[in-house]
Amino acid sequence: MSLPPSQFYSLNPDVKAPTLKRLRALSRILDKAITIPGTGIGIGLDPILGLLPAGGDFLGVLLSAYIVLEAARLGASQATLGRMTMNIIIDALIGVVPILGDFFDFAWKANDHNIKLLEEHLKFPSQKKRADTWFVFVLIAVLLLLAIGLVTFSVVVSRFVWGLITGS
């Protein structure tokens, strides 16, 4: 006796493929769009955005949060979404540290890791319970607060440095 298809997929499988393709493309743009000649190492928009004071890290977290939101829409489990969120938090918190954070952003590919986690979940969607709406809301709220905190931190540090330079 087979189970009805609704227990295997939260969305029609034909809808999942284009969404996953779009998320892969976004991840590639954010993490490894440009390959450094002769090295095979790719850099993307996320580490470049991280070089911009204040707003760069904010945009990076928001774009990464979109991948988590879409993963939830595709039916990812709480464990998968939690690991995806931790990847973004690690990327954001270490990425905000001057110089060290910039090098870390080139090496740590949080969005690429998150796409792999989502693909692993989608291989066996019926084996893991889908995350509920409140859990997803809390994760997105945490990421939004993190993004706002990064902007605040950058502004405070910039004002402090400017005060040291100008003597005011």
Image (spheres, helix red, strand yellow):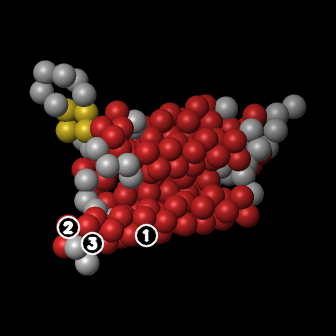
The residue mark sitting in front, 1 or 2, is 2
Q: Nearer the viewer, mark 1 or mark 3?
A: 3
Q: Secondary structure at mark 1?
A: helix
Q: Please state which of residues 90 and 97 is positioned toward the viewer in this rendering.
A: 97
Q: Is residue 87 visible?
A: yes
The residue at the far front in this view is 167
Label 1: how many Cα within 10 Å (few below 14, some 14–19, many 20+): some
Residue 40 vertical placement versus 153 (above, below)? above
Q: What is the CA distance from the residue labelled 1 to the residue labelled 2?
A: 20 Å
Disc on res. 152: 1
Q: Position of residue 30 (x, y in %)?
A: 33, 47
Type of amino acid at the residue the image marks with label 3: Gly
Q: At which x and y percent is residue 104?
A: 36, 38
3D distance between C-alphas at marks 1 and 3? 16 Å
The residue at 63%/47% (across/down) is 81
Q: In the drawing, what numbered circle is on residue 163?
A: 3
103 is higher (above) or lower (below) than 93 = above
Name which quarter of the figure residue 27 lies in.
Answer: top left
- Tally of marks: 3
Specify whether residue 88 is in view.
no
Q: Quadrant of the N terminus?
A: top right
> Dot 2 lies on which element?
helix
Residue 54 drawn at (x, y percent)? 33, 65
Check disc 2 and report the residue beneath it: 165
Residue appearing at x 48%, y 36% in the figure = 113
**Given contact means CB atoms under 8 Å apart, are the residues at marks 3 and 2 in contact?**
yes
Amino acid type of the residue tagged 1 in the rendering: Thr
Horizontal relation, residue 126 to residue 15: left or right:
right
Q: Are marks 1 and 2 in contact (CB under 8 Å)?
A: no
